[in-house]
Amino acid sequence: MSAAAALGGAGYEVELFESRPFLGGRATSYPVPASPDEEAETIDNCQHILLRCCVNLLNFYERLGIRDRIEFHREFYFIEPGGRISIFRRGRLPAPLHFAGSFLRMACLGRADKIGIARALAALRRERTRRTDLDRISMLDWLLQKRQTPRAIDRFWRQVLVSAVNEDLDHMAARHGFQVFWLGFLSRADSYEMGVPAVPLGELYSVEAWSRFGTVRIHTRCPVERITPEGFTAGGQLRSADHYICALPFERLEALGLAAPPFTHSPITGIHLWFDREITTLPHATLLDRTIQWMFNKNGGRYLQLVVSASRDLTNLSRNEIIEIAVGDLRLYFPRVREARLVKAHVVKEQRATFSAAPETEDLRPPAVSPMKNVFLAGDWTRTGWPATMEGAVRSGYAAAEAVAQAAGKSARFLIPDLA
Ligand SMILES: Cc1cc2nc3c(=O)[nH]c(=O)nc-3n(C[C@H](O)[C@H](O)[C@H](O)COP(=O)(O)OP(=O)(O)OC[C@H]3O[C@@H](n4cnc5c(N)ncnc54)[C@H](O)[C@@H]3O)c2cc1C
């Protein structure tokens, strides 16, 4: 979609083929079945969030004219079992000291944890451009080198990074942990602000949004079956163009005759719970020490979306077991859950949520150009420098669009450099 928007905006004739009836891929929404007397409810496959440092994603939303549908939040709420809340927000000091005040007040961390974290953040600023092994060691290796306390690892580093990178600290290349903290928390005072779409994800990519691109045609329910330099087949029909961008998830490449990188997946589980009353007034919160990592308040505190990233421990559990864990966890943080009745629940286990951003993976990620000179690659798994995120996906599309322009003998800049 980002490649289509960039090239369409530059006047290229673009045709986009999507196998499903709707756009959005892994970042989309769909109606969940309701009982006969209820209207079907449109839900996101899982809550998706972004940070202000996702400059290309925000640029893509601007191209679609939907930037104002993203609401930014300046406060992160860390809740302990029992309900005590620590608020992380920026204060008046300039970056990188902008969090100093709220960080010192965080009740969920002790003095030794905070001193260790402050030292590690200072080391991260120094080492990010100097160390050459950050793709070879795990983030946990690095944190242990920096002698972080177990509580600092569990309640601070893990809590932020597992959701941002969708991988456990011991499976995550340190370079990704560095990038999240550098871009999101240290480089600029506002880059950590969390953007939450105010509408279901699918509405972001509506027909109306695409109508501003006169040269982009979208074909849904039209799976591509094969790609070669001579053309591709979609819906049983051979089609040809000057250039092709393949933006499939990596596990689908082989079926289309392209080489797939040897990546593994990391799962994410989204749990949607509807209660008969308001459970919380917080807009969102990160939940410490238990299975559920994030809570998002979707409808006056009655509908909560819960997220568990790198959710391998949930893979073999049934829907009911997962709901039981989720409601049990919520009781510890939000006492109103004890009296509330669960009206409806929906669990989405995305086993192939993202590629695993493990050590030694970066060099295996291919660039936009492929061995076929008029076929280009995009997707969050290509070499974007980012973990698998919407920002990474948009960057990959912009990089592929630039490569197409270059192959067409023109030059175009779509990619926006990182903030720092
Ligand atoms: C549960 C979950 C939660 C996430 N949370 C976040 C988050 O909070 N923030 C964030 O930034 N990122 C998040 N992500 C990651 C983000 O969704 C992905 O990184 C991003 O959407 C990937 O985009 P993509 O275009 O590379 O791939 P996809 O979104 O997978 O798009 C590929 C498209 O190709 C289509 N397709 C497949 N085969 C064919 C074919 N043969 N012919 C035609 N079309 C085909 C698919 O239907 C799909 O629409 C999350 C992902 C998941 C699964």
Image (tube, rainbow, N blue to C red):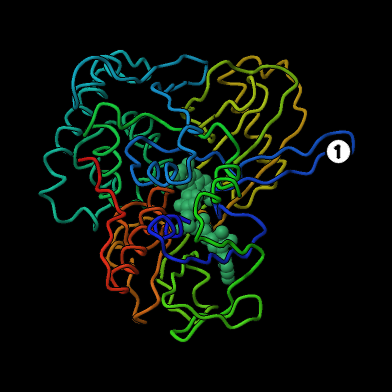
Disc 1 element: loop
Left or right: where 324 falls relative to 126: right
Q: Residue furthest right?
A: 36
Residue that mark 1 sits on:
35
Does 71 sit above or below residue 137?
above
Does 246 sit above or below residue 218?
below
What residue sits 65% from the left and 75% below the top? 235
In front: 309, or 7?
A: 7
Left or right: where 304 falls relative to 309: right
Does 104 sit above or below residue 142?
above
Q: Position of residue 164 (x, y in %)?
A: 40, 42
Mark 1 neighbour density, 10 Å: few (under 14) some (14–19) many (20 or more)? few
- Figure quadrant of the C terminus: top left
Q: Position of residue 155 (x, y in %)?
A: 38, 29
In front: 223, or 160?
A: 223
Observer able to see residue 268: no
Mark 1 residue CB less than 8 A from any atom of ligand 1:
no
Q: Position of residue 102 (x, y in %)?
A: 30, 16
Residue 86 in which image quadrant: top left
**Total marks placed:** 1
Q: Amino acid at mark 1?
A: Ser
Left or right: where 296 falls relative to 123: right
Q: Residue furthest bottom?
A: 230
Observer able to see residue 82: yes
Does 327 sit above or below residue 408?
above
In front: 326, or 221?
A: 221
Q: Position of residue 418 (x, y in %)?
A: 25, 45
What residue sits 31% from the left and 63% below the top? 402
